[in-house]
Image (spheres, rainbow, N blue to C red):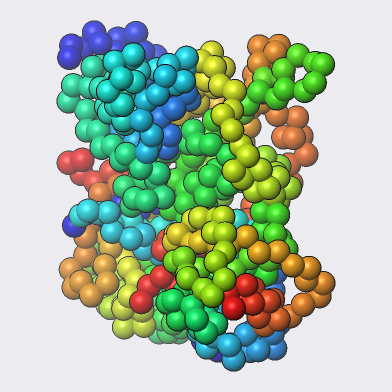
Amino acid sequence: MSVRCRVPEQLYRRVREDLARPHEFAAERVGFLSARLGSRVGDERLVLFSGYHAVPDDQYIDDPRAGARINSTAIREAMQRVLDSGDGLFHVHHHAHPGRPGFGWMDQRETPSIVSSLQVAGPHQAHGMVLLSNDFCIAHIWLPRVEKPVVAQRVTVIGYPLQFFDAEGE
Amino acid sequence: MPAREARRKTIMEFSAEQLQELRELCPGAQPCGEGGVPYIFLPELNMPEGCAPAQVDALLCPTAHHGYTSRLFLAQRVSSPQSRNWSTEARILERTWYAISWKFEQPNLRLAQILALQLRAFR
Amino acid sequence: MTNDRFSRQSFLGERAQEIIGNSIIGICGHGGGGSHIVQQLAHVGFQHYRIYDGDIAEDSNLNRLIGATVDDCQRESRKTTIAERTIKGLQPNADVKVYPCRWQNQPEPLRACDLIFGSVDGFAERRELEACARRYLLPLIDIGMDVHCVENEPPRMAGQVILSVPGGPCMFCLGFLNEQVLAREGERYGDAGPRPQVVWPNGVLASTAVGIAVDLLTDWTRELRSVVYLEYDGNRNTIKPHVRLQYLPTSPCPHYPANQVGDPAFTMR
């Protein structure tokens, strides 16, 4: 099963602008992208990003071991958003370097548990993690009722021009 | 009313009271929209006696739609006591819908009244 | 295929041919406009096509259907067959999937495209295609032409090229679609008759559309555009930005809000 993601350019820009804002103590910012699934085309699924929700400044935990950690209120609000809207949610943050980014050990340890909570709230949508670098974007997607994530084959920013971020090896 | 109602935005906001009236005719009625046009999804709408099938998914557009003051789209062509001209096949909200040619004046009608007048064509 | 094949278009950028070769292109309508588009895409080097058209080739198409032959008409060849033949003649290894039907009958493959061209008949068809494109976040390039005959005056030939990018102004925002034109079209249902169509304006419009697509994909001009809505005057042989662009609202498109994407919720049972 392969997954392609699409995000409108205005939304992509809004995410980048928000994540670039400085925080009092967190080295990085975190937000959530709303997403909906497109129906299956052969072995392929579409994830379509539709909105962005910044995590408020007071919902961060001051943890020097991590670029950013969000508290239980932030996670509860994200779950409530899933329940209210029926949308999927993707945890998104930014690593300040050029080129293809990679999820760090903290990301790989903490974020999947956030995604699990989102899956409980909304088992019929896709949830996951998006990571931006200065000039690239990757996404890991947990499809409905699937335990392990899939790496997005392609993330497309829909604007003029189109921007394509393909998975390694594509 | 389900919490998911909040996420569907339409240009025309229907009053809760009118929606409740409509739900007495079709319990699962849900507002939706596409291309700036408001619709109300009517799952398994009961058709008038003598129609086959007796229930069909429907989409009510209570505003001007391609020259009609309102339109009732059905998920399939329905046979009715009087034969009708099925003039329209349209793709809306990722489904194909069918509608008959049926016009009437509708000054300031409530949603339930519009639906009732649309269904009159199938009696 | 040798490296010389695309040497004359290397100005498009170092990665251009790779991007072009990897892009999946949807073409709705392989008639007078769509057939030009398909031919040009094949020349440029596109490799992945999803083509929809439910019609067969007829004599009355031969004045404008690129790639169609007298033989095709005698054999009642499908237009999608002609499309595939055109492409494979230039790109033998291309991945071409044809759907000899309206796109509405098999919409799933269209959603998987990176970009779609619309060369369909009528305003209602355009509304439906744009609604799908907006829902699945697909850029859509629409082309069309018409000839208006008015008594005691020369015919007026006009056309349009519209790039509809999700998030940007839609055809309703641009004033190209509205309830009045849709209503007039609905009233003419059954009385439409054959519409005047000739090859050269289709060529102008299709070439312009392909140029927009290549730029959208490769960014070779490095000229950011917010909206593309071009009007074609076939009597004066001009194509220029539509005057309505001066009056575009600056607010986001209200017809296709950002949160109305993906499969509609009520279809999920």
Nearer to the camera, A37 or A25: A37
Q: Could you say where residue C86 lies in the image, as x and y percent from the top left?
A: 29, 20
Nearer to the camera, C143 or A162: C143
| Above or below for A151 versus B38 | above
Q: Could you say where residue C35 lies in the image, as x and y percent from the top left?
A: 40, 23
| Quadrant of res C244 | top right
| Quadrant of res A88 | bottom left
Residue beneath the point at 52% across and 84% down: B49
Residue C213 in view, yes or no = yes
Residue beneath the point at 67% across and 70% down: B62
C243 on left or right of C14: right
A150 on left or right of B112: left
| Above or below for C210 versus B99 | above
Q: Could you say where residue C91 lies in the image, as x and y percent from the top left?
A: 23, 20
Query: How many numbered marks does the figure carry?
Result: 0
Residue beneath the point at 20% across and 55% down: A43
Residue beneath the point at 71% across and 81% down: B113
| Above or below for C256 versus C79 | below
Q: Could you say where residue C257 lies in the image, as x and y percent from the top left?
A: 58, 59
Quarter of the image where the N terminus of chain C is located: top left
Residue A55 in view, yes or no = no
